[in-house]
Image (spheres, grey):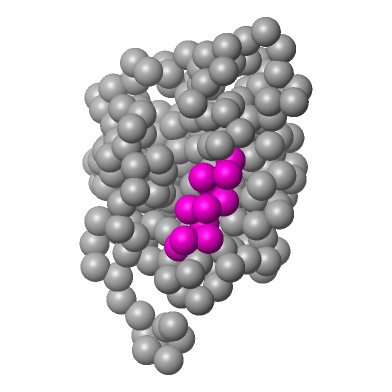
């Protein structure tokens, strides 16, 4: 299956928090969109790998994505090495996405920046034909996406591009709250409160989207960074 857009992030819920509105927008426009989680988030304080897997699928159903996979790299301990790079290369060549969105360049959680660098390096290597990979016994063709963007996560980074998600905010919010063990404190048990389970975290998520939206005179927006300069064909499409 070839994808138009692939969001490839390290923890289940990163995609929803950073790009849930963009995912919903392009699904609504008929684009083929997928999510790949690098890890199962098994080191998370609340919930388990099994509950996160179920919650991730519930969120995927809300967003309407065509595919969601988990590469099961080691949460907290994955490295930017040959083994992890080849795992990502196989996934990129499998889905051949036009655009990839990955984690923030730098963030409060050390996994985020490390995953961003890992994905960036693997995307470049995926385009080298002398790196040979196979999937289900079939040799894969070299492939490199034409565009890579990064999320803006907990640490504020000046965005290079903003996208209006006003019409899709409710879907984004519902997809986040599908992670009941992480965010929905009303369903909490005796597990300890965390940075993200505190209700203020969801309030700040909404406030961030409103702040970014105000910059382009819309109610809600998501922001992304780019490692390269971005070009447009028509200045009149910008606002």
Q: In this view, does 217 lie to the left or right of 186?
A: left
Q: Is residue 43 left or right of residue 111?
A: right
Q: Where is residue 78 in the image (x, y as percent from the top left)?
A: 34, 20
Residue drawn at the location 49% of the way across and 26% of the way down: 195
Outermost residue, top direction? 190
Q: Where is residue 212 in the image (x, y as percent from the top left)?
A: 45, 62
Could you say which quadrant of the image residue 197 lies in? top right
Work out whether residue 65 or residue 134 is closer to the camera in this orientation and state it. Answer: 65
In terms of secondary structure, what is the magenta stretch mainly? helix
Outermost residue, front direction? 200
Locate the C terminus and report the quarter of the image it occupies. bottom left
Q: Is residue 33 within the magenta segment? A: no
Residue drawn at the location 52% of the way across and 53% of the way down: 207
Work out whether residue 55 or residue 94 is closer to the camera in this orientation and state it. Answer: 55
Q: In this view, does 85 lie above or below 160?
A: above
Work out whether residue 82 or residue 119 is closer to the camera in this orientation and state it. Answer: 119
Residue drawn at the location 25% of the way across and 24% of the way down: 81
Q: The magenta stretch spans which residues?
A: 202-212
Q: In this view, does 24 lie to the left or right of 130?
A: right
Q: How many marks can you see?
A: 0
Q: Does the rendering let one see residue 132?
A: no
Could you say which quadrant of the image residue 50 lies in? top right
Q: Does the rendering let one see residue 80?
A: yes
Q: Position of residue 95 (x, y in %)?
A: 52, 47
Q: Is residue 208 above or below residue 233?
A: above
């Amino acid at each position: 299956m070839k994808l138009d857009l692939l969001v490839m992030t390290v923890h289940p819920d990163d995609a929803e928090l950073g790009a849930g509105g963009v995912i919903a927008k392009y699904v609504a426009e008929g684009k083929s969109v997928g999510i790949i989680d690098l890890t199962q988030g098994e080191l998370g304080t609340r919930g388990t790998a099994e509950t996160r897997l179920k919650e991730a699928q519930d969120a995927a159903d809300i967003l309407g994505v065509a595919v969601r996979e988990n590469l099961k790299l080691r949460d907290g301990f994955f490295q930017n090495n040959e083994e992890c790079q080849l795992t990502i290369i196989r996934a990129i060549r499998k889905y051949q996405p036009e655009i990839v969105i990955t984690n923030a360049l730098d963030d409060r959680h050390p996994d985020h920046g490390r995953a961003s660098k890992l994905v960036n390096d693997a995307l470049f290597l995926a385009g080298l034909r002398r790196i040979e990979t196979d999937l289900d016994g079939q040799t894969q063709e070299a492939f490199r996406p034409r565009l890579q963007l990064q999320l803006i996560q907990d640490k504020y980074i000046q965005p290079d591009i903003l996208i209006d998600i006003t019409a899709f905010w409710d879907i984004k919010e519902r997809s986040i709250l599908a992670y009941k063990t992480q965010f929905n404190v009303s369903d909490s048990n005796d597990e300890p409160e965390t940075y993200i389970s505190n209700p203020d975290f969801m309030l700040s998520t909404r406030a961030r989207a409103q702040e970014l939206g105000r910059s382009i005179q819309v109610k809600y927006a998501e922001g992304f960074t780019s490692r390269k300069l971005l070009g447009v064909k028509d200045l009149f499409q910008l606002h």
